[in-house]
Image (tube, rainbow, N blue to C red):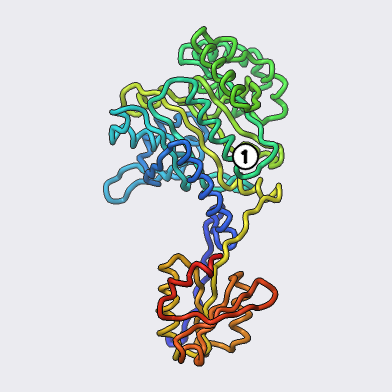
Amino acid sequence: MVDQTVPRKLEKLYAVKGMNDIVPPDSAHWEALEDTVRALMSRYAYRMVRTPIVEPTALFVRGTGETTDIVEKEMYSFEDKLNGEQLTLRPENTPGVVRAAIEHNLTYDGGKRLYYIGPMFRHERPQRGRYRQFYQVGVEALGFSGPEVDVELMLIAHQLFANLGLRNVRVEINSLGVAAERRAHRAALIAYFEQHADLLDADAQRRLHANPLRILDTKNPAMQAMVAQAPQLLAFLGEQSLAHFERVKTLLSACGVAWSVNPRLVRGLDYYSHTVFEFVTDELGAQGTLCGGGRYDGLYELLGGKPTPGVGWGMGIERVLELLKEQGKSSALPVVDAYAIIPDAAALPVAMHSVQLLRSAGVSVQMHASTGEGMGSMKSQFKKADSSGARYALVFGADELAQGQVLVKSLRDGQGAQRLESLTNPALWASTLQS
């Protein structure tokens, strides 16, 4: 008979494969990147938008495209047990932002410039820079039809990579024209691929009549030479589409951004039109696309809204952090201004109150805490103060407290300089701890 009084050891639980914890000290690099993003977006007058992680499945079937890999293979979809509604963890955020803009009539008084930072979800094999839960920075400009906004978005990405100190990131651009031009190109593609049906793999054969444009994006080495000779969409562009594309190139050059035309750049989603672009690197292997996007003038209508132009991009945070690491650009870890050393628990009331006043005055302070066996020796506390990276130690000793003072000891000047400060109003000397 099993003794029920003996606690049973529970099985250890782990995170879902491909959905990673972000813990210190790595989380500091994420914070630094996000702070850089927010500061840059403010300079370009872009405002934060937050949309739900869970959206109706139909949003992505209609918006992203029924025959895309995302919808066919990668979405985390489920049925709501309460009402039977079909829901999906967002695999990307452009449809969600456009859905929100339609729902809240955001563009009633003119165009809107928006950005977001958050997690996306795709069910695929985890690998370097490609995870099941991954994070994106995204930018969406809604209600603007001119090529100057296409360029503005590329300038934001270009400036972000410059601000991060990244090297060897190049810009590739292409034009997908308008729907009628894509239809003509589609017919030519189908005819061409049918002539080379014996070279098509199973995936290409499946896409031949559903979405032949995606065949151009194949990674199958056996098909590369044949695909390279396929009709190019640029040859089917009309006067207006060509003029839009030429203006994009002219404005990029005027702003000092080097670019190259990649006629095989199609992006994987159905809603793109006119300008498409990618920021790529050769230093991350197969996951070399850091940022990609383009214009999606038909997406509003696909989601039930009035015709409204839009353009945007998404940037993979993990890939950018991976490139920063590859290029030795890791950001400095944050450190506190001061570490509070408390020799005796009797000093805790005064110490905690004083530390709180310092924090209110803008000083970052880490307070020593007991481990269940007392506060610890002065030597061990100073050791922890030093390892914390703090510039100063605040010693709340009995002698100092009896005089209404705290000992302030420098930890970084090599001399261990120290002085006494009054506890009457710590805010008066708070600034010296930050100098």
Q: Residues within 10 Å of mark 1 (few under 14, many from 20)?
A: few
Q: Position of residue 90 (x, y in %)?
A: 43, 42
**Residue in the foreground of this view, choosing between 178 and 24:** 24
**Residue in the foreground of this view, choosing between 4 and 133:** 133
Q: Is residue 122 visible?
A: no
Q: Total label count? A: 1
Quick check: 31 above or below 265?
below
Q: Which residue is mark 1?
A: 162
Q: Residue furthest toward the top? A: 239
Quick check: 268 above or below 371?
above
Left or right, 41 with reference to 190: left
Left or right, 415 with reference to 390: right
Dot 1: element: helix
Q: Is residue 332 visible?
A: yes
**Residue in the foreground of this view, choosing between 192 and 146:** 146
Q: Position of residue 9 (x, y in %)?
A: 51, 78
Quick check: 254 above or below 82?
above
**Residue in the foreground of this view, choosing between 121 and 226:** 121
Q: Position of residue 376 (x, y in %)?
A: 56, 88
Left or right, 331 with reference to 97: right
Type of residue at label 1?
Ala
> Considering the image in quadrants, where does the C terminus appear?
bottom right
Q: Position of residue 162 (x, y in %)?
A: 62, 39
